[in-house]
Image (cartoon, helix red, strand yellow):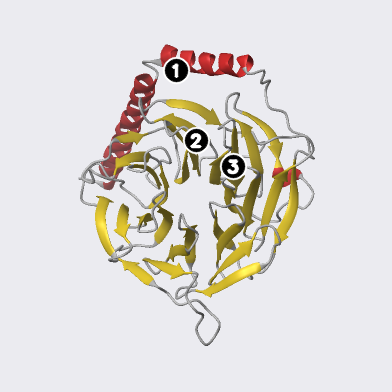
Amino acid sequence: MSVAELKERHAAATETVNALRERLKQKRLSLLDTDGMWILEIFYFIAGYARSQARTPVSFGPTDLVCCRTLQGHTGKVYSLDWTQEKNRIVSASQDGRLIVWNALTSQKIHAIKLPCAWVMTCAFSPTGQSVACGGLDSVCSIFNLNSPMDKDGYSPVSKMLSGHKGYVSSCQYVPDEDTHLITSSGDQTCVLWDITTGLRTSVFGGEFQSGHTADVLSVSINGSNSRMFVSGSCDATARLWDTRVASRAVRTFHGHEGDVNTVRFFPDGNRFGTGSDDGTCRLFDIRTGHQLQVYYQQHGDNDVPHVTSIAFSISGRLLFAGYSNGDCFVWDTLLAKVVLNLGSLQNSHEGRISCLGLSADGSALCTGSWDTNLKIWAFGGHRRVV
């Protein structure tokens, strides 16, 4: 067979594959739309409820959410942060190889923890706030007891190392109301439920199982209303819902994104969850039906669409906070899918990529972390109440 014939066959095969992909995409969309009227009824009900509560479309001014503190101390890019339940402490992880525990009210550093591996990607407080967990390129999730005495160099020692992943640890979260279990996600395409007391894996989600992710898993979020359920986001452009009692298969797979799903977060009611992706969109999904309920996308003039790096919902779920790779931090009205404020356009905003963000437990403050090495605390000001 000649080279010309091979090229011709290759071109024909490529055309066939592309056509099949388009047919698959259209089929997915049609399946998602089969119950479209029912979804619209949900939103009409929500809108009616909002009106009955005398709520008008959310409007924000530049003084409604203001930067009240800048936390300076890291010397490298900030990659992750988490709040304690009592809202007065924040832990942050940075490329400088340290975890810092901050007093959110005074901006003072309470703990500085030197890490075994400088390439840290995630950190989390335990529910009691007595321990912090972190993970990164060493493929290990390390636990630090904040009550342990410092070593001779003034650093907190590692109290437990959870080893078992075959790829980097991208995300970790403690099971609500338990200091003894947490869930991690990894570049090995799996999520793991750990027993911290024994240091052993309780369950592995994905991997050799066909319903698992087919690329790196980047984020996990545990359902606050039902801690047996969690959702994961992956480089395979999907999010998957898992039940910790059935590790062999995902409960449901959610399609729609056209890029890596970098971040996932449950909606306050536990029946929905949000995602953020390299495709520049945030999306809202219903875990009961599998339907995509809303898309949050801001049109850009050029072709360089900023990636969504992190998201968080307000206490009521009416607002969605989304951080972007270009330094924007949009506050979305989740009902109307409109941007009501861009923190990146305000004074004292970050000077680099927004890599992480999180809301305090009572919803009164937002913390953002950036590649500019700083964290910023944003508080509701003026007569704006927590939404």
Judged from the image, the secondary structure of the residue bearing numbered disc 3 is strand
Q: Quadrant of residue 111?
A: bottom right
**Camera-side mark, 2 or 1:** 2
Q: CA distance from mark 2 to mark 1?
A: 19 Å
Q: CA distance from mark 1 to mark 3?
A: 24 Å
Find disc 1 in the rendering and name its residue: 39
Judged from the image, the secondary structure of the residue bearing numbered disc 1 is helix
The answer to which of 363 and 368 lies nearer the viewer is 363
Find disc 3 in the rendering and name its residue: 322
Answer above or below: position of 249 versus 271: below
Residue 305 appears in the picture as rendered: no
The 10 Å Cα crowd at callout 2, few under 14, some 14 to 19, many 20 or more, is some
The 10 Å Cα crowd at callout 3, few under 14, some 14 to 19, many 20 or more, is many
| Residue 52, percent from left and from top | 61, 14
Q: CA distance from mark 2 to mark 3?
A: 16 Å
Q: Quadrant of residue 106?
A: bottom right
User: Which residue type does callout 3 highlight?
Assistant: Ala
User: Which residue type does callout 1 highlight?
Assistant: Ile
Give the mark nearer the N terminus: 1 vs 3: 1
Find disc 2 in the rendering and name its residue: 268
| Residue 39, percent from left and from top | 44, 17
The 10 Å Cα crowd at callout 1, few under 14, some 14 to 19, many 20 or more, is some
Answer above or below: position of 22 versus 178: above
Q: Residue at point 71% right, 46% down?
A: 379
